[in-house]
Amino acid sequence: MSIFSSIRDRIFGHKPTEAPAPSTQSAPISPAPQAPAPAATASAPEPAAAVDVGAVLSEMAAMKGGGGDYQRSIVDLLKLLDLDSSLAARKELAQELNVHAGADGSAEQNIALHRAVMAKLAENGGVVPDSLRNA
């Protein structure tokens, strides 16, 4: 699995802690049995809701007591997501995202990687605030 896929999966798969489960007690009781839904409707996937990347990362940071400077630092972002933040991992991520800014591990490359990750998350359906895109 690619490093970006791991990043995407951690963010897009994050479940908010404040979303309560819907209550089944308020459903009306029907005296007659209902016919099953048509197969075409049951098998059609529901459209994926856009993921608020800023809100997810903020919640994850709060759960971990801060999260460092994940808004600007690719290293802190990877650590927040419990992913490998080593130079080797960042080199691999740079290859995946076609980032060729600065020397490997330099501040210039790390900034470019963070921006590229945020842009790619937006391309994949994430709602990324400008504060994370232009950090």
Image: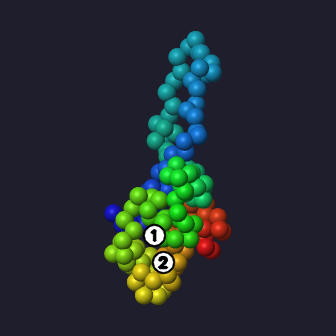
Q: Who's the residue at 59% across and 20% down the image? A: 25
Query: How many labels were placed on the picture?
Result: 2
Quadrant assignment for the N terminus: bottom left
Instruction: Report x, y in % for residue 7.
Output: 44, 62
Q: Who's the residue at 44% across and 64% down the image? A: 78
Dots 2, 1 in contact, CB < 8 A: yes
Quadrant assignment for the C terminus: bottom right
Q: What amino acid is found at the position of numbered circle 1 in the picture?
A: Val
- Establish if 50 lies above or below 107: above
Badge 2 element:
helix
Task: Please state which of residues 105 and 48 is positioned toward the viewer in this rendering.
Answer: 105
N-term mark: 2 or 1: 1
Type of colouring = rainbow
| Residue at far top of view | 31
Q: What amino acid is found at the position of numbered circle 2 in the picture?
A: Asn
Instruction: Report x, y in % for residue 82.
Output: 41, 58
- Establish if 30 lies above or below 47: above
Instruction: Report x, y in % for residue 104.
Output: 40, 83
**Residue 75 circle label:** 1
**Residue 110 circle label:** 2
Instruction: Report x, y in % for residue 97.
Output: 44, 76
Badge 1 element:
helix
Q: Who's the residue at 47% across and 59% down the image? A: 80
| Residue at far right of view | 130
Q: Is residue 92 visible?
A: no
Q: Is residue 37 visible?
A: yes
Q: CA distance from mark 2 to mark 1?
A: 8 Å
Q: Who's the residue at 58% across and 55% down the image? A: 58
* Horizontal relation, residue 114 to residue 135: left or right: left
- Establish if 4 lies above or below 36: below
